[in-house]
């Protein structure tokens, strides 16, 4: 009997939309920060992006995709989301809000569709790397494909 493929929601959605991606696997038992993951995979950290979720008004959630070695500028994020302010959600809330866990949160395939913003530096690369939706899985894809499938917009999001 053939082994069943164990694709993530993000991979299934990319395939349903005819978007090319490459799955990259790494050994990891628990959360590792993105800089560590980049090093494990031999990638330049500037091309590896993390997914952050913030809340503005109660229950108004937003997704921000920024380089792993950078810090999200919350003022820029709030302006992008047309909120007075936003704050990152607590780690314990990640699963309830997104359906993913810390270290495996992908901007693609969350429980609900949230407004999504990608740092403009993603456009500097032919391919970027994002979480594949499970710890130990990274996906390489075109930033424009990510922008399209997540209905996102590019914007300056990182702290100076």
Image (cartoon, helix red, strand yellow):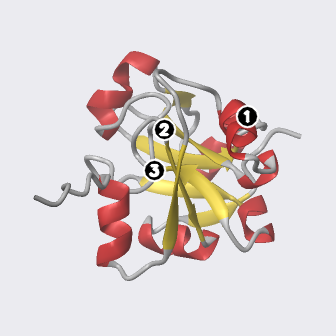
Rendered-image quadrant of the N terminus: bottom left
Q: Are marks 3 and 2 in contact (CB under 8 Å)?
A: no
Residue 118 place in picture, x, y as percent: 62, 57
Nearer to us of marks 2 and 1 is 2
Label ID, residue 35:
1
Looking at the rendered structure, the secondary structure element under dot 2 is loop
One can see residue 109 in this view: yes
Neighbourhood count class around disc 3 (C-alpha, 10 Å): few under 14, some 14–19, many 20 upward = many
Q: Quadrant of the C terminus?
A: top right
Q: Where is 64 relative to 129, above or below? A: above
Pointer 2 or 1: first along the chain: 1
- Tally of numbered discs: 3
Q: Which quarter of the figure has residue 38?
A: top right
- The residue at the point 30 percent across, 64 percent down is 12
**Residue found 69% across the figure and 50% down from its top:** 48
Q: Position of residue 66 (x, y in %)?
A: 67, 47
- Tag nearer the camera, 3 or 2: 2
Q: Are marks 3 and 1 in contact (CB under 8 Å)?
A: no
Which residue is more in the foreground, 155 or 22? 22
Mark 3 sits on what residue? 132
Mark sitting on residue 12: none
The answer to which of 80 and 136 lies nearer the viewer is: 136
Q: Residue furthest right?
A: 160
* Residue identifier under label 2: 136
């Amino acid at each position: 009997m053939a082994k069943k493929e164990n694709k993530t929601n993000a991979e299934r959605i990319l395939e349903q939309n005819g978007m090319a991606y490459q799955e990259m696997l790494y050994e990891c038992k628990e959360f590792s920060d993105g800089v560590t993951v980049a090093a494990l995979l031999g990638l330049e950290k500037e091309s590896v992006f993390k997914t952050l979720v913030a809340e503005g008004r109660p229950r108004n959630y937003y997704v921000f995709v920024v380089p792993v070695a950078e810090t999200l500028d919350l003022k820029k994020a709030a302006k992008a989301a047309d909120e007075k302010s936003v704050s990152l959600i607590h780690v314990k809330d990640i699963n309830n809000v997104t359906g993913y866990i810390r270290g495996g949160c992908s901007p693609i395939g969350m429980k609900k569709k949230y407004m999504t913003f990608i740092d403009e530096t993603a456009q500097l690369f032919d391919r970027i790397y994002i979480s594949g939706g499970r710890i130990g899985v990274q996906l390489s894809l075109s930033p424009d494909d990510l922008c399209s499938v997540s209905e996102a917009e590019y914007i300056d999001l990182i702290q100076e």
